[in-house]
Image (cartoon, rainbow, N blue to C red):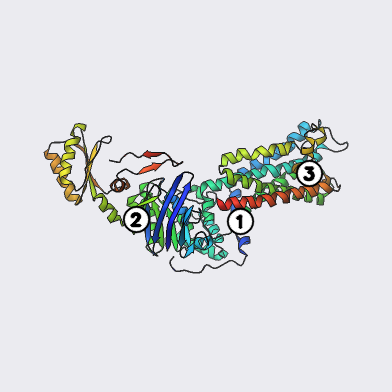
């Protein structure tokens, strides 16, 4: 449904997207995972016909983005991280105008606006100015706007970035509902958890290049499973905790000197946690915290690239190390 | 969503439909910020009152003409240019907030984004001009030639529409609302003040007169004065319309090209 070949986008000397090829079959939900500045939004803009690539081709639903951008536009729905809804209009007006721009007759535009408002639980707020909406409501309205044209391909650019955890969970429920209907979806995200929750297949992108491909489980497999993390009370105990965890884990032990904690990938999360607790307790080491957690984007990055995820500054030329999270 | 229901279409031709939708959107936004309209109207009204009462007695020009009759056409054309700054501000705001990205991702006529914007701002300028004329009448402006007044206001609206496109082009290049607001006024001030807007050109220094006599603001102001005084506007009206058309011929393609390239 989406077929990208050798797409490259240069911003001056920086290659925001560097020779990316991607095939997304019909009805697949594909997660595009990467840190800030990895090139996710740039790639989305190419597919949504907002940006011409310097090299390469992209075909959406059989239509080339360069040769027939309008055919592509009538197949896609785009919801962006900046929630492109109009503050000074009501929720309903926002959707009706999008409907009008799809050249729908007035009654039909109104019907579809109602439908989208209903399904995103915005009916009660439909006639309020968007200015008065919460962050989560704005994102929902933005999603609603992308549905008005009944797209076959839905492009969601970081749909939950900047939302609080509860609102994110709410939005995931709506997104799961949408993707379960079998549309083809391209979803960009910085959160492995989000990609895991919503996507069938995940493509990991860094510095404009694809660095890994697979299901969430396959990617987590490369990290070596879940992580047991222990935080000793005293810095002096870090080395002893590291030695103890090494006997329990299935991969390399990481020691974070600044956050004062030690983590190791494990196979059986509960069993490993119990073992770790017993071993540390028997050694008489006092802990501030002990837990088991799923690997984050950073962990996947560390496993794949050997370095933590880097954020690019807006001008794109000065990589800044994100502090390792554990 | 999977079912490919062929979208039904409006009976209107595509471009017209999109232009109406975009104009409506921008007018709705305008109605939701009445404070902006109020301030945008108060400013020229203050100009009418200030210039009339402060300079009315001291500006030296043709015998037997009241200063207010001289001033109102000037303020109408000043409004054409000042109001065009709103196009720059509105468009950069849409660019920043991602609204333009949404429109560009829709299968619409993309030129409707710019046409809808410039239309809405021209309608807004027309509203302001109506209020200025009414205030002018309240403080002593008189004409026996209402047809001429209407034609004159239409010339001012045509010039406003042309300058909307100039500022739309400018906005698409600078992209930043604050820079757009500051930058928009740079060319506006010399055009408005080195003109017959508030004072006769013959009192200006000789080197300035060739510019002041032939630039778009002066010819439009002079045409409106002639029309409201019942005199043939002749060369001034032709030049004013010529300027508006020429500006549109240059700036519509420029703005459209920049919009397409992003």
Q: Secondary structure at mark 2?
A: strand
Q: Residue at x 13, y 42 (%)?
A: A279
Helix, strand or loop at disc 1? helix
Seen in the picture, residue A47 relative to B199 is either above or below; the reply is below
Residue on which the image places disc 3: B219
Front one among A82 and A10: A10
Q: Residue at x 48, y 46 (%)?
A: A11
Q: Which mark is residue B112?
A: 1
Q: Is residue B35 visible?
A: yes
Residue closer to the observer: A152 or B21: A152
Distance from disc 2 to disc 3, alpha carbons, whole Å, reads 64 Å
Give how far apart the Cα atoms at labels 2 and 1 are: 38 Å
Q: CA distance from mark 3 to mark 1?
A: 31 Å
The location of residue A142, given as percent across then percent down, is 47, 54
Query: Label 2: which residue?
Result: A202
Disc 1: CA contacts within 10 A as few (<14), some (14-19) or many (>=20): many
Mark whose residue sits in front, 2 or 3: 2
**Chain ID for label 3?**
B
Q: Residues within 10 Å of mark 3 (few under 14, many from 20)?
A: many
Q: Quadrant of the N terminus of chain A?
A: bottom left
Label 3 sits on a secondary structure element that is helix
Residue A121: image quadrant is: bottom left
Nearer-N-terminus badge (3/1)? 1
Residue occupying image coordinates x 32% and y 43%: A308
């Amino acid at each position: 449904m989406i077929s990208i070949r050798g797409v490259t986008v240069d911003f001056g000397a920086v290659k925001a997207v560097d020779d990316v090829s991607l095939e997304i079959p019909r009805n697949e939900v594909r997660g595009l995972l990467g840190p800030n500045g990895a090139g996710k939004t740039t790639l989305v803009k190419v597919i949504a016909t907002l940006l011409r690539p310097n090299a390469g081709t992209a075909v959406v639903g059989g239509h080339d983005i360069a040769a027939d951008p309008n055919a592509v536009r009538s197949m896609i729905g785009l919801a962006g991280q900046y929630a492109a809804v109009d503050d000074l209009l009501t929720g309903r007006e926002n959707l009706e105008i999008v409907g009008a721009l799809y050249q729908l007759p007035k009654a039909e535009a109104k019907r579809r606006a109602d439908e989208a408002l209903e399904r995103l639980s915005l009916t009660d707020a439909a006639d309020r100015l968007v200015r008065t909406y919460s962050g989560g409501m704005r994102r929902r309205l933005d999603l609603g706007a992308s549905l008005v044209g009944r797209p076959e391909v839905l492009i969601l650019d970081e749909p939950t970035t900047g939302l609080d955890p509860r609102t994110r969970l709410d939005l995931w429920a709506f997104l799961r509902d949408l993707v379960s209907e079998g549309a083809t979806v391209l979803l960009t995200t910085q959160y492995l958890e989000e990609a895991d929750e919503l996507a069938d297949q995940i493509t990991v992108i860094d510095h404009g290049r694809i660095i890994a491909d697979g299901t969430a489980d396959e990617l987590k497999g490369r990290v070596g499973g879940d992580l047991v993390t222990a935080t000793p009370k005293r810095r002096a105990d870090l080395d002893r905790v590291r030695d103890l965890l090494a006997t329990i884990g299935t991969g390399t032990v990481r020691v974070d000197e600044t956050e004062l904690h030690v983590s190791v990938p494990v196979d059986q999360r509960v069993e490993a946690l119990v073992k770790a607790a017993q071993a540390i307790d028997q050694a008489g080491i006092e802990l501030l915290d002990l837990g088991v957690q799923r690997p984050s984007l950073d962990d996947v990055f560390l496993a794949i690239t050997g370095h933590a995820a880097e954020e690019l500054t807006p001008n794109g030329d000065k990589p800044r190390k994100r502090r390792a999270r554990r | 969503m999977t079912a490919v229901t062929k979208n039904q279409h409006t009976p209107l031709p595509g471009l017209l439909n999109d232009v109406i939708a975009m104009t409506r959107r921008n007018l709705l936004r305008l109605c939701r910020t009445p404070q902006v309209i109020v301030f945008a109207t108060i400013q020229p009204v203050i100009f009418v009152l200030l210039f009339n009462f402060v300079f009315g007695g001291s500006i030296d020009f043709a015998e037997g003409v009241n200063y207010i009759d001289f001033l109102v056409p000037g303020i109408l054309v000043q409004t054409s240019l000042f109001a065009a700054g709103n196009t720059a501000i509105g468009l950069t705001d849409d660019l920043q907030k991602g609204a333009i990205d949404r429109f560009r991702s829709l299968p619409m006529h993309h030129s409707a984004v710019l046409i809808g914007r410039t239309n809405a701002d021209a309608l807004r300028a027309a509203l302001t001009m109506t209020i200025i004329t009414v205030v002018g009448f309240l403080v002593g402006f008189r004409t026996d030639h209402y047809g001429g007044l209407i034609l004159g206001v239409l010339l001012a609206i045509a010039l406003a529409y042309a300058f909307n496109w100039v500022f739309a082009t400018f906005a698409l290049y600078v992209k930043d609302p604050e820079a757009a607001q500051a930058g928009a006024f740079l060319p506006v001030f010399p055009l408005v003040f080195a003109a017959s807007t508030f004072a006769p050109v013959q009192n200006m220094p000789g080197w300035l007169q060739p510019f002041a006599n032939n630039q778009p603001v002066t010819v439009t102001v002079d045409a409106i004065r002639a029309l409201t005084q019942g005199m043939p506007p002749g060369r001034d009206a032709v030049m004013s319309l010529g300027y508006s058309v020429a500006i549109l011929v240059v700036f519509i393609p420029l703005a459209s090209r920049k919009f397409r390239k992003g």
